[in-house]
Image: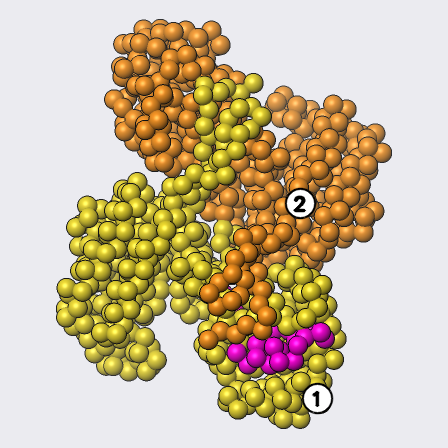
Chain colours: A yellow, B orange
Amino acid sequence: MQVGQLITDMAQAAREASRGVASAPVAQRNDALLAIRQEIISSRDSLLAANEADLVSARRLELDEPLIDRLALNPARLDALEEGLEQVASLPDPIGAIEHLRKMPSGIEVGTMRVPLGVIAIIFESRPNVTVEAAALCLKAGNAVLLRGGSEAIHSNIKLGELIGRGLAKVGLPTASAQVVPVVDRDAVGALLNLPEYIDLVVPRGGKGLIARVSEESRVPVLKHLDGICHVFIDRDADPEKAMAIAINAKTQRYSTCNTMETLLVAREQASLLPRLVRAMQEHGVEVRGCPASRSAAPDILVSAEEADWGTEYLAPILSVRVVADVEEAMAHIARYGSDHTESIVTENSETAARFLREVDSSSVMHNASTRFADGFEYGLGAEIGISTDKLHARGPVGLEGLTSRKYIVKGDGHIRQ
Amino acid sequence: MQVGQLITDMAQAAREASRGVASAPVAQRNDALLAIRQEIISSRDSLLAANEADLVSARRLELDEPLIDRLALNPARLDALEEGLEQVASLPDPIGAIEHLRKMPSGIEVGTMRVPLGVIAIIFESRPNVTVEAAALCLKAGNAVLLRGGSEAIHSNIKLGELIGRGLAKVGLPTASAQVVPVVDRDAVGALLNLPEYIDLVVPRGGKGLIARVSEESRVPVLKHLDGICHVFIDRDADPEKAMAIAINAKTQRYSTCNTMETLLVAREQASLLPRLVRAMQEHGVEVRGCPASRSAAPDILVSAEEADWGTEYLAPILSVRVVADVEEAMAHIARYGSDHTESIVTENSETAARFLREVDSSSVMHNASTRFADGFEYGLGAEIGISTDKLHARGPVGLEGLTSRKYIVKGDGHIRQ
């Protein structure tokens, strides 16, 4: 069969199945997650064998070691997977409740109800655990889901798809509610992106190349995450100890995450903090690149920041530092070079903080806290499908609610419009 | 200048201006609307003269009478326009408040703040009053706006753009916050749709051709309204008088609106209502087209409904009628032929009603009320930029909130992530 036809058939089946999941009571959706968990527990051996087939190919293809590591399943990772399913099952039901019901002057009552989006396609790269995590979140929110993982993980993903299907069948939900695309053909992605009649949302998870391709090509709405060029601004009125702690944590707690600080902005009056701060960064192995004013204040900064540094997401132990005149100049720098992801101000001045919180146009804006907190679990969402840097629909860490829509509910008693 | 360059320059200026509007206090945004109102009041004569130029061309081009009517401004319409500006100015500020602030286990407080979307492009057809209404809503929500009206209204729109710009300048807001595209070149629309770096949202308002073109071509997210094929279902347990009143109101109160009923579904047990109902429709001048069972029940139905009738938005005094076995079959019909806009069930059975409200996947789902209530003003939104049949971001009648985004706000006191 042509891959385009295969994907169309799968998407059409998902659309039909989506009505079944959407109208399933929450107990049945939770039971499905627990049944999938049980299938994974009972099939650990064959799952690890399928994963081994992927690992053998990966090694034969001499793929990068970090990629091979992300690809690998092992008992500890399966434990985490199984725990994740239990945890999503225990979250409150995001759909079905009527909210904000208000009586209008005409006499009708108007409220809203959270409802599933319908069919969601997740396009991701090598980590096979995403297959299960994403399926769990979509099903919990009453959606059908199409899962397209990386070609390196195809054996693992097909096996996981089979176990998910078995779990769904056990609780009487259509197996087409969660389907793994069983081919590695790159055209499968193009086909998914071209089916707005069957698919309501595409969520790409992976590197910038994948996300750029999906954004460029998709005729289906995309929930995406672009760069995370996050800033901490140490204001004139900052407490130096809080500033030190936040800056060091925001940079060094993890280097590869999107909410890691990449540029530190320091108010002129706080430049005297820089020597200590730079030393601390260097002790963590961070290379510091500075503007001329920062290098004057801290001669230990051995590298000059170039124009390109301000717009770079290092995802590495590198930090650019700039001295600015005031909060105004800091916000202008963020507006010009930032990626609207996460920025934090350190200050004891509540007016300056309020202004920064109001005027900085990023998905998370913080006061006296590390940018590393920008995360669905830290925000109490209970789960996270990703972090959106879009401004429509869902912005910032996206939990179950981002996988829902809402509709208006109107209650009358024979009311007609005058 | 090339039209592409003109539009790019306008969009870039709008992006820059958007920061000014976004950070303007609500009093200044309201004053802008009142200043625009004052400019319109002081320039009524030159505005009516510009409109007369449009009307002269329209008559010379022998445009349809209804189109010429929509194009015309007159003192009564200007009154309405001026009142509208006052009314939007009096609405509560949709942006800036921190909501849902909650303390997390880590000690940080997490909440959300409604913020402007940024730059919105409105692409609409002949009615020049949309220029002012749309500008008012966008500015109130702290956005910059690009307005592209129909070519028939170009003189009126350019004049209105000038008055809007003067009002903005009077209160010290950038005039680029609201700009009318001053050329009729069709390429201007294509150019707008291709600037996702400057424009955050496109709202097409007009006929199906316009909306289809915008949806197909746009690289900017679109908030759109497709068909309104609305249904009323008279359930087995319906109160006959409520059923009669709602069906007649939903069809006959206005024929050209998207929330008008196009298909009436009647449970088998209620078929005996049909003769009376059909007579009442016919007295209103409505042509009724029925399925075989409805024609047996009501021989006054002279026309057979064809398959194509079920998927047609008549926007005219025509109604299709189908007898169905039960609520199940009614919902299946709606899922197959409907446009997910607005559906209503008439029933005294609260279980059946709850099921219909939960399972029908439309932007508005109603119980014992006329579909004609699906409207931003009736829902208490205070204003309406349009009705969205999309499932992402905003669904159903869209008021000021649909023109906003939200961001996460995090408050700490030196908190770092463990």
Q: Quadrant of residue B267?
A: top left
In the image, the segment drawn in magenta is: A225-249
Position in image of residue A9 (x %, y %)? 26, 48
Q: Amino acid at mark 1?
A: Ala
Q: Tell me the CA gap for discs 1 and 2.
A: 44 Å
In the image, residue A257 sits, relative to residue A408, either above or below, namely below
Q: Amino acid at mark 2?
A: Asp
Q: Quadrant of residue A391?
A: bottom right
Q: Residue at x 75, y 38 (%)?
A: B160
B77 left or right of A414?
right
Question: Can you identify the residue that label 1 sits on?
Answer: A297
Q: Secondary structure at mark 1?
A: helix
Position in image of residue B181 (x %, y %)? 69, 45
Q: Residue at x 36, y 48 (%)?
A: A93
In the image, residue A93 sits, relative to residue A297, either above or below, namely above
Q: Quick one: B229 or A300, which is closer to the camera? A: A300
Mark 2, other Cα within 10 Å: few <14 / some 14–19 / many ≥20: many
Q: Secondary structure at mark 2?
A: loop
Q: Residue A354: within the magenta? A: no
Position in image of residue B76 (x %, y %)? 74, 23
Position in image of residue B206 (x %, y %)? 56, 35
Question: Can you identify the residue that label 2 sits on?
Answer: B93
Q: Residue at x 42, y 22 (%)?
A: B368
Which chain letter matches label 2? B
Which chain letter matches label 1? A
